[in-house]
Image (cartoon, helix red, strand yellow):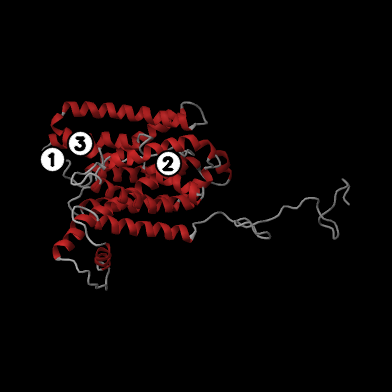
């Protein structure tokens, strides 16, 4: 016995009164706890969801095509694959030149919006954070509206440049998220979900007022701007896909490489700094990357809300709270979600087409109410 009268674990025959039991992530005794990782079944489910959305998006439309034939024709796009799909040249042209670019664009935009939403939720430690609710989309919308009206005033020379609209959207979205963050921080060090949402509403109202003024002064561009504001995935070919793809690659690489830092930031800045992380530097990098992805998505598809809150929050509830799990799955299921939503927008009121932003708002409104009620009980 030691002088205090308690057992000394270093001596044979003496054991401490309490010995913590080590468990694995599955609860098995005798092994250290391991952080949650991306399970293969969830990854497989995400890939299947993307493939289903791809085939459904290409098959359904004014001219319905057999899903089996569509799948065979899509496989023919792979090198070394030659299958008889039974489709005519006209039907093959519909697939490759009209529907497939639109579906691929939906997959990219949905993945970007969901990834940005999950990233913002981790950076702000708030399950209600979203590119749309934080005012990022409104800032991008104001900047793109300004680019459209100024470009029209310059004879279309500005908007004709491939980089003009994405660059304007990026500047507007980054300015909006900075304003939202600063305005939310004005309430104190501890930013509640309500404070952040109110800050986003205020920033959105500010940019909406500026956008309204621009439209009032340039009424001849109202139709073009409104068709963009309501959200759409209409594309005349692969141009928009190639325009978004570099931003998609850059955003996804930066955010996914730093997804572990989001888990560290969730414990607080002081604790994260004690673990060797530079909180502000990581936060600014992730905000810039997520804003870039939002800017690219908004510039290609207009304002499509609630994707960044529906998908990441669903993944958090189903697959776990670690951002190493949430972010990759959000990209897969976010792309599938928007591609399938576009199918609903194209077919629900055929031959007319519902703006996809309207469909996501109808789905996201009730979901946001559910998240608002359960946000305090969900562990980030």
| Residue at which label 3 appears | 225
- Residue at the location (56% across, 42% down)? 267
Query: Element at badge 2?
Result: helix
Is residue 103 in sight in this rendering?
A: yes
Q: Which mark is residue 120?
A: 2
Q: Front-most of 1 and 108?
A: 108
| Camera-side mark, 2 or 1 | 2
Residue 77 position (above or below residue 175): below
Is residue 285 in sight in this rendering?
A: no
Residue 76 position (above or below residue 298): below
Q: Position of residue 47 (x, y in %)?
A: 39, 59
Q: Position of residue 164 (x, y in %)?
A: 22, 43
Q: Position of residue 324 (x, y in %)?
A: 48, 52
Q: Front-most of 184 and 308?
A: 308
Query: Element at badge 1?
Result: loop
The picture quadrant where one finds residue 301 is top left
């Amino acid at each position: 016995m030691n002088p205090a009268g308690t057992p000394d674990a270093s001596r044979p025959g003496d054991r401490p009164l309490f010995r913590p039991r080590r468990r694995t992530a599955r609860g098995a005794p005798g092994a250290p706890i391991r952080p949650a990782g991306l399970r293969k079944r969830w990854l497989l489910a995400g890939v299947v969801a993307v493939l289903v959305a791809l085939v459904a998006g290409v098959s359904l439309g004014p001219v319905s095509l057999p899903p089996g034939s569509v799948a065979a024709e899509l496989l023919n796009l792979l090198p070394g694959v030659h299958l008889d799909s039974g489709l005519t040249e006209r039907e093959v042209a519909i697939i490759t030149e009209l529907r497939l670019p639109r579906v691929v664009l939906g997959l990219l935009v949905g993945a970007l919006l969901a990834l940005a939403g999950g990233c913002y939720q981790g950076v702000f430690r708030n399950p209600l954070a979203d590119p749309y609710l934080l005012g990022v989309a409104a800032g991008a919308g104001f900047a793109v509206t300004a680019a459209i009206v100024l470009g029209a005033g310059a004879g279309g020379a500005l908007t004709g440049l491939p980089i003009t609209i994405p660059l304007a959207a990026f500047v507007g979205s980054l300015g909006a998220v900075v304003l939202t963050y600063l305005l939310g921080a004005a309430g104190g060090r501890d930013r509640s979900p309500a404070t952040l949402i109110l800050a986003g509403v205020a920033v959105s109202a500010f940019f909406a007022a500026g956008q309204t003024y621009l439209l009032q002064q340039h009424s001849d561009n109202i139709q073009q701007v409104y068709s963009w504001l309501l959200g759409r995935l209409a594309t005349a070919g692969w141009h928009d896909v190639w325009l978004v793809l570099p931003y998609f690659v850059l955003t996804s690489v930066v955010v996914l490489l730093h997804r572990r830092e989001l888990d560290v930031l969730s414990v607080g800045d002081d604790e994260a700094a004690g673990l060797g992380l530079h909180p502000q530097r990581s936060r600014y990098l992730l905000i810039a990357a997520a804003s870039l992805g939002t800017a690219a998505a908004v510039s290609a598809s207009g304002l499509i809300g609630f994707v960044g809150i529906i998908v990441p929050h669903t993944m958090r509830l189903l697959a776990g709270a670690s951002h190493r799990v949430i972010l990759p799955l959000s990209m897969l299921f976010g792309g599938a979600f928007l591609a399938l939503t576009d199918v609903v927008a194209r077919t629900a009121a055929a031959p007319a087409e519902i703006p996809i932003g309207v469909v996501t708002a109808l789905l996201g409104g009730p979901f946001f109410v559910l998240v608002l009620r359960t946000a305090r009980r969900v562990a980030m």
